[in-house]
Image (cartoon, grey):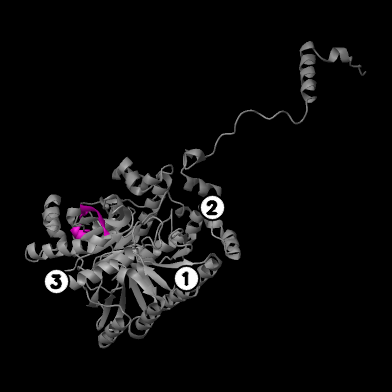
Amino acid sequence: MNATLNPQQAFTDEQKEYLAGFLAGAAQPLNPQPSTLKPAEPAVHGAPLAELCKQERWKYDEEPLDIWDKLLAHADENKFPDEADTFRFRYHGLFYVAPAQNAFMLRCRIPAGELTATQMHGLAEIAHDWGGDYADITTRSNIQVREIAPKNIIKVLTKLQDIGLTARGSGVDNVRNITASPTAGIDPTELIDTRPLAKALHHYILNQRDLYGLPRKFNVAFDGGGSVSVVADTNDIGFIAVRVNEGKGIEPGIYFRVELAGITGHKQFARDAGIIVKPGQAVAVAVAMIRVFTAHGCRTDRKKARLKYLIDQWGISKFLEEVRHDLAFPLVEFSRDHCSLPQQPLRHGHLGVYKQAQRGLNYIGVAIPVGRMRTAQMRRLADLAQNYGSGHFRLTPWQNLLIPGVPDAFVETVKRNLIRMRFHYEASTIAGGLVACTGNTGCKWASTNTKGQAIELARYLEKRVPLDQPVNIHLTGCPHSCAQHYIGDIGLLGTKTTLEGESVEAYNVVLGGGFGHDQSIAKEVFKGIPFSALPRLLERVLKVYVERRKTGESFAAFARRHETKELQEMFSQ
C-alpha cells in the first residue's frame, strides 16, 4: 500500500530555512560586482615585478630571443628600435649605438677566437656591403662590424649564419664570447689544448634557453698555459691549467684551477676558489656556476648584478655549495701550493714569429693597430692564411691576430705581405702594446676618441722614445673599462676637463698594472690631463723610466717601486 507524502510534513523548519536561503542566492544576477581586492603582483626571480630594474621588466614583458618577427618588421621599415627593443635586439648581436652613430653594430661570437679564412672573407663582405667597410677585433677575441642600417640587419644575421658564425647572446645579459689561449693546440709549452672546451661550452649555451637572460653579462675563459695569455683572471670564471704531480688521493695529471669574480673595471681580479677540476668536468662546472648566478644574482640593481657582488654577499664557500647541488660529481678542494703553475707568458708574445709544436710550422703574430681592419686588409689577410698558412686565424685579447701553420719556407713571404698591407709583425714597443676601446666615435658612453688618439699617441712616442722592452698602453673611454686600462703598464681612462673655459677630452693616467703572474691593479698618478698635453706627459714618463730604472726592470715594476707622490714629482719636473 503506497502512502501519499504530505508536502507540509516533508521538511523540517531547519530545512525550510536552508531552502529559502538557497533560492534567494540563486535569484541573484550571474555577474556580481567586481571585487575591490587588487590581484597579487607576480614575483619574478623572487622579487616583486615593480622592484625589478627596467631591463628585467623588459625581459618579462617580451622574451628577447623570440623577436625575429620584430627584427623583420624593423628591417622592412628601415626603422630603429625604441629603448626596450634596443635592449632586446642585443640578444641577437645588434647594438643600436646612437647618438655616437645612428646605426647598428654587429658583434659576433667566435668561440676560442678561432676563425677560418673563409669566415674572414665573409665578415669582410658583411662590412663592405652593409657596414662601414671596416671591422674591429675586440678584447674578447671577437669581431665587431659597425655602421649597419636597419634595413640590412636581417641580411647581416643570415649571412653570418651562412658562414658558420652567430651573434646570438653576444650582448647584454648573456654569457659573452668564450675565450681560450690564442696559441692552443700549436704552442710547444702549453699544458692542454683548451679549444675543445671553449667550443663545447659555446654550443651548450647556444642550445640551453635557461643560460640566456642572466642578471647581467658573464665572461668565461680557458687558459691552457703557453706563450700568449688569455687574461683569464679578468673573467667571472677563469679555468687555469695546472699540473698536479702528487696529492692526497689525487691522480697526477693536468687539471684546472678555478678562479672567480674577476671584474677589473671594479679593480678586482678573479680569486682562486680553492678547487681543481678535471678537464672533462670543466664545462659542467661552468654551466652549474652560471645557473647558480642566474638563480641568485641581483635583479633589482644593475650596479650589483655581477658575480662579484653575489660572492661578496655569500662568500666563495657558500657559492660552491650551491654549485655542488647541480653537479653529479664532487668538487675537489686542493691547495694551490701543491700545483705546478704554467710558465709565465711572453711579454708581447702575441707579436712576431714563433715555432709551433708541429715540426716545420710557425705562427706569426700580426699587429693590428687598435684592432681595426679595413675590408681590403681583411681579404688580403684571408688570402695569406689560405695560401701560406693553415687557413685559420687566432684572435687575441690584445686586439690582434695570429696566422698559424706557416711553413718555414713561407715565413718571409708572409712578413713582406703584412708590411705591404700596412700591418707589421714586430713587437714594437708602443704600437704592439696598444689597446683601445671603441671610443666616442662609436659608443655613447665614451668621453674620448680612444682609437684615434691611441694611434696619434703611438706615432708621437715611437719617434721620440726608443725602448728596449715592451710597454702596454690601454685607452678606455669610460669607467666600464672595455679596454681594461687597470691592467696596462700605462692605463688611460677617458674623461672631460675644462681648458680655457671649454670642455675638452682628457684622461686620468694610471700606472703599473699587470695580470697573471704579474697581477696588479694600476694606481692613479694623474687626473684630468687634456689630450693635447698627454703625448708630452707620456714622453716624459717613458724617458724618466729609461733613465732611472734598474737593470732589466720593466715599466710596471718601476712604477710599483715608487709611491704615487714620487712618481708625480719625477714626471712633473
Check the image and report above or below for 357 versus 492. Answer: below
When asked about the image quadrant of residue 180, the answer is: bottom left
Of residues 503 and 487, the one drawn nearer to the viewer in this rendering:
503
Q: Quadrant of the C terminus?
A: bottom left
Which stretch did the figure color magenta? 514-530
Amino acid residing under circle 1: Gly
When asked about the image quadrant of residue 514, the answer is: bottom left
> Closer to the N terminus: mark 1 or mark 2?
2
Of residues 59 and 478, the one drawn nearer to the viewer in this rendering:
478
- Spatial CA distance of label 3 from label 2 is 54 Å
Residues tagged 1 and 3 counted as in contact (Cβ below 8 A): no
3 or 2: mark nearer the eye: 3
Q: Residues within 10 Å of mark 3 (few under 14, many from 20)?
A: few
- Does residue 235 appear in the picture of this structure? no
When asked about the image quadrant of residue 404, the answer is: bottom left
> Closer to the N terminus: mark 3 or mark 2?
2
**Which residue was labeled with disc 2?**
63
Q: Is residue 516 magenta?
A: yes
Q: Secondary structure at mark 3?
A: loop
**Which residue was labeled with disc 3?**
468
Q: Residues within 10 Å of mark 2 (few under 14, many from 20)?
A: few
Where's residue 392, x and y in %?
A: 36, 77
- Spatial CA distance of label 1 from label 3 is 40 Å
> Closer to the N terminus: mark 1 or mark 3?
1
Give left or right: position of 25 versus 120. right
Amino acid residing under circle 2: Glu
Of residues 63 and 418, the one drawn nearer to the viewer in this rendering:
418
Where's residue 402, x and y in %?
A: 30, 74
Taking the view exactly as shown, the residue that stands out farthest to the bottom is 409
Q: Secondary structure at mark 1?
A: loop
Amino acid residing under circle 3: Asp
